[in-house]
Amino acid sequence: MIKQYDGGAYLVKGKEIVADGPEAAAKVTSLTGRNVTKEEAAKETMAYGILKDHNTSGNMDKLKIKFDKLTSHDITFVGIIQTARASGLERFPIPYVLTNCHNSLCAVGGTINEDDHMFGLSCAKRYGGIYVPPHQAVIHQFAREMLAEGGKMILGSDSHTRYGALGTMAMGEGGPELVKQLLSKTYDINMPGVVAIYLKGEPVLGVGPQDVALAIIGEVFDKGYVNNKVMEFVGPGVDALSVDFRIGVDVMTTETTCLSSIWKTDSKVAEFYDIHGRSGAYKELNPGEVAYYDGVVEVDLSAIKPMIAMPFHPSNTYTIEEVNANLKDILADVEKKALVSLDGAVDYSLQDKIRDGKLYVEQGIIAGCAGGGFENICAAAEIVKGKNIGADEFTFSVYPASMPVYMELVKNGAAAAIMQAGGVMKTAFCGPCFGAGDTPANNAFSIRHSTRNFPNREGSKLQSGQIASVALMDARSIAATAANKGFLTPATDMDVDFKCPKYFFDSTIYENRVFDSKGVADENVKIKFGPNIKDWPQMSPLTDNLLLKVVSEIHDPVTTTDELIPSGETSSYRSNPLGLAEFTLSRKDPEYVGKAKAVQKAEKARCAGGDAIAELPELKEVIEKLEGICKIDKDNTGIGSTIFAVKPGDGSAREQAASCQKVLGGWANIANEYATKRYRSNLINWGMLPFIIDKGDLPFKKDEYIFVPGIRKAVEEKATEIKAFVVRDKAYEFTLKLGEMTEDERTIILKGCLINYYKG
């Protein structure tokens, strides 16, 4: 079904793979009639060409990228614009779209969500942007319909910013990276590796894009095969897929931890742009005659079966057939894995889901940027047509990804078929993807065509003794399960004639509701500030030395951004940095906030010229034990907190996972590795040191102090290894690593955060 190559490979004429090795060059020559070096062939990928066109450094090893367009939603755009305003923003230099698809229910916190929306509309007018009102479209569907262009690049403040199927290289990053673009700065990275995703064959009826995506994620995630690389979709199998199908696979590539994606384009993509009234946006993209890739994932589409990603990660994949055949064993394995994620906070069992030897689920949802596409919902409607979901616990909800898609589903009868079967049609909203809507009952099991199934991401609260589970599936198999009244069923078991009606896009919906400044800023417009919208607190520059208390220690194999700062109702407070910070690690380590604040009191006293020890008496003994190492005084040593996590930062791009630690006095993270480039960038942009420590027994533990002498000098002198001391009965030396940083990143760290960096 899926094969990963051990090393690099050549792709010849878009069809034949030649694995790298002693005979590879000769074989390539025999196929093409010319000699091609590996270095030349590496420049023939689509990714290389697009990155080259957007690089301003003149050095393809050290990229400085300027994007063509930006996009954000209502969880992130307030913080981004506030940061940019504090850094000197005068107008949006490139098209910037502000969508409202995350806090659009306005169900929590009184006026604060709609206040954020009004802030966004006023900023679109003031700075020359585009504003998409609530319920009109989820962020990525609007970008597909109205922003994507062949050969262009889009940066979004959401991790699922992926428009590669349309020929657009898109990346999801934390808000500070968008701030840099708003201030006409660059996105700085080393040239990423490029991995070919070679598709062949054709999916069987009933297999959808989520099935293909989950099969790939299940193979590559644990191995880190595409981590921080560009996934380039090539091969004859691409031609067999509709554009909607390609989009459905593409959006899920985030869950592999890749950097971005790009697909070859063809007449089907040209037709997509034609349908959306943007024919000029199409560009044919193909790799060169001979392209060299750093790796290859070969996917036989015809061998893919309906898939399910069991709790609590998109990579925890099985075929639905496997689950039904080995139900007790697989559920027991899921429960065992959950012990790590849930850390014994609640009792967790799935055994009660077995009814008459079958798996019963309580909820099915098709939603968001992954599931809410036209073809997915039409296929689901065909499956449930003439059937019903029953009057028991099982519920079925469908969220079209945009109002134009919704209207077409109404016109062609798909919406009626779903509603007649007992399903509920809802407006464009991302809530089911991050826990702001459709939270299941306690102990309930939900199957969703959405993007993630991390612990508590569906909205349950461990701290309140609640637990629910989400498994990821394709819309077709969710509909088959709905037609079977909640019993897990693969769509391939259904005898359905998938008609796939033609899609007609009506642009008047957006013309009538979306505010588009056409890039014209109006400085006379006053920005509307609700009472929850707060400025960022002052942040200190890096001191000569650091004294850090380890206030949390996490040993899970991977720590998600959802665990660092929970999603769901907390998203409503993201316009208030200090208010949101109260939720930091609340579902993973409820003691964190109190411990961090206690340390921060000492630092605030130090900065004010007062007595830090009076605020935190335990410092006296710690400092005495460090006397022989370094002279410590209130001017040269910052006092703060740090956390250790094995591999933090998987999942969302939200910068709040870092900024909340910073506003609570965090100076650093310590990890064996960082799950994503974007989380590490978020740490740096908020002035936090991304320390690395070798795997093995930790030289420190929770509640101990770490002293890092000469840290400012080490950053200035580009040191990669830094001497540190853990304080016990005396100070014990160990080594921290800092890793490669750009000159700008080092300066940001020294200044204390990105805002300080731009203030000068």
Image: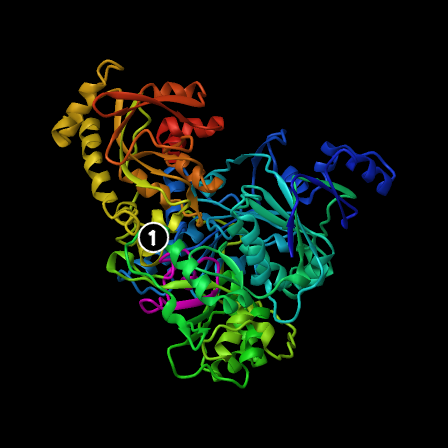
Q: Secondary structure at mark 1?
A: loop
Q: Left of 294 or right of it: where is 161?
A: left
| Residue stretch rendered in magenta on the structure | 430-458
Q: Give the labeled residue for mark 1.
A: 566
**Residue 364, x across and y down, in percent:** 45, 71
Instruction: Residue at 53% x, 82% y: name it.
Output: 417
Q: Look at 23% across and 25% down and name the residue there.
A: 728
Does the segment drawn in magenta span residue 441?
yes
In the rendered structure, does residue 375 fall within the stretch colored magenta?
Answer: no
244 relative to 44 in the view: left or right: left
> Where in the figure is residue 279, as x and y percent of width and height?
68, 59
Quadrant for the C terminus in the image: top left
In the orientation shown, which residue stands out farthest toward the bottom?
Answer: 386
Q: Residue at x 45, y 30 (%)?
A: 745
Residue 100: in sight, yes or no?
no
Image coordinates for residue 338, horizontal then vertical, percent: 38, 55
Task: Answer yes or no: is residue 498 visible.
Answer: yes
Q: Up-down: is 52 above or below 360? A: above
Of 568 and 67, which appears nearest the observer? 568
Displayed quadrant of residue 496: bottom right
Q: Is residue 301 left or right of residue 113?
A: right
* Label 1, residues with CA under 10 Å away: few <14, some 14-19, many ≥20: many
Q: How is the image coloured?
A: rainbow
Dominant SS in magenta:
loop
Question: In the image, is residue 384 above or below residue 263?
Answer: below
217 or 280: nearer the viewer: 217
Q: Residue 592 is drawn in which quadrant?
A: top left
